[in-house]
Image: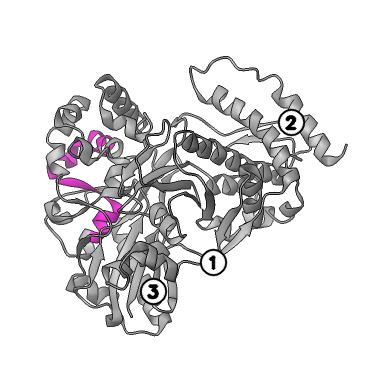
Amino acid sequence: MAIVAGVDFGTLSVRVTLLDSESGRLSTASAEYPLKRKREDPDYATQSHTDQMHALVKATRKAVADAGVAGDAVGAIALDTTGSSVIPVGANLEPLDDYYLWCDHRAKAEAQQITELAHKEKLEAIEWCGGVYSHEWGFAKLLHWLRHNPEKRDQFVTAFEHCDMVAGTLAGISDASKVKRSVCAMGHKWLWNPKWGGLPPQQFLSKLDPLFDGIREKLAGEYLTSDKIAGHLSPQWAEKMGLKAGIPIPVGAFDAHWDAIGAGCREGDVVNVVGTSTCIIAMEKKTTLVPGVCGVVPGSVHPQYTGVEAGLSATGDIFEAIARRAATKVSELSKGLEQYRAGQTGLLRLSWDNGDRTVLVNSELGGVTLGWNLIHTAQDELFAAIEGTAFHTRIILERMAEFGVPVERVINAGGIPQNNKVLNQVYANVLGKPVLVPAGIPTSLGSGIFALLAAGAFPTIEAAQDAMCLKYATYVPDPTAVAVYDRLFGLYRNVYFALGRENADAAPLGRVLPELKRIAAEVRGL
């Protein structure tokens, strides 16, 4: 028997779950930290490392107290984080600034520069991230920071992804070169792959900007999958957290990847981690490059499989924005949505409010709603937004399947599916597949599974999943709704590629609005 702690750092809070290898979840506790935004700069989003560590201590102590166990009974602690959330550090692992959070979008120019030079230089790495380097990713954010903080450049030692920084901090490591780096984080966001010797060549990085001279060496170190150990809990942090010093800390990963493991992901599954944004995670034994799919990394989700990551840049954020503009809450605006039928609103909404992460990888796009009339309501738009995020998900799943990624089962994980039956049913109807939803919150369960492996409680990830993962609620497609959504999806796909690509071929869009009206009238029986 083993008791372990699984930690999940989200956008606004950290969640700590204690798991018993025999009886499962013992307790879960969370603590919040502020997200720093600037009204004058909507692309700005940062977070304090100190705030996050204080919240981790608070949540851990509460989880231990709620479980009614002694802190020294906890045999391992594992953590996942948002990504790409990047922090520049100086000597002794001291932060030189806040994290550039995953949703910080200031590095658009840098990302475009990286993409253009990578294609010009025929850098193989760019093909492994769908052909476009994102402003949400590590090198773009680091270059933006170096360009805009000249007074701190002399102090700069290296930069870390959030998961690696927290693991290194908890292990009491002060030498940046000794911090283990996550294959998941660096593979998906930093163009790392052992196929070409790790990071891109220094010559390429220096050609991007002389500020990157020597950066490859500064980012050097051991790059490991999550079945390896990042370090052991230091006495200092053990005392703060009320745990035992010396317990193992496995190499961390991104929250969506471990959420997929916690949701029971196997080869053939696609896990939609639906929260403020959506991360779409799959894994396969072979390695398939998929145009427009932003991450294909061996060992990133499961050490023995190739991880495939795609997603939507905004999902819950869109729902929140619609409710905010209507001066209400999503929970209030959602009341009555179960009465809505497929296509009844006559609206077609594209979920580009925060740009397009997959498959267009275009940060310059904005949200689009077609079909408005004078009596449409905010609730109508919310339902259309749910349909729109499902259509966008179908675009992604069809692209993955087209290039050989197995898509046999769909699992809706993350926070939103737990509280939104309408969304799950719409997704089942739009995708034309049963949608499985864990019967409980799987967040931090994936990190708990990796902690159990580090503690030696299970021999494999699959064995731990069999013991720890939750049962599913199943949403079955409704044939009538499926037929309507197949018609709407044809319109959506047409508009998605016609409006979303700057050099798109001419497309017949004149039928879209009349067809939306016809479908709505048919559904309402008019």
- The answer to whether residue 158 is magenta is yes
Which circle's residue, 1 or 2, is located before the other in the chain?
1
Q: Residue at x 82, y 36 (%)?
A: 522
Segment tinted magenta in the rendering:
143-167
Q: CA distance from mark 2 to mark 3?
A: 49 Å
Whether residue 355 is visible: no
Q: Is residue 299 visible?
A: yes
Say which of 280 and 382 sits in front. 280
Q: Can you give x and y, in whole percent of width and height, for residue 25 in the image?
A: 44, 74
Q: Which residue is mark 1?
A: 471
| 187 over 504 or under it: above or below | below
Main SS, magenta residues? helix
Residue 250 covered by magenta stretch: no
Label 2, on which residue? 516
Which residue is tagged 3?
18
- Which quarter of the image is occupied by the N terminus? bottom left
Q: Amino acid at mark 1?
A: Lys
User: On the image, which quarter does residue 448 sit in?
Assistant: bottom left
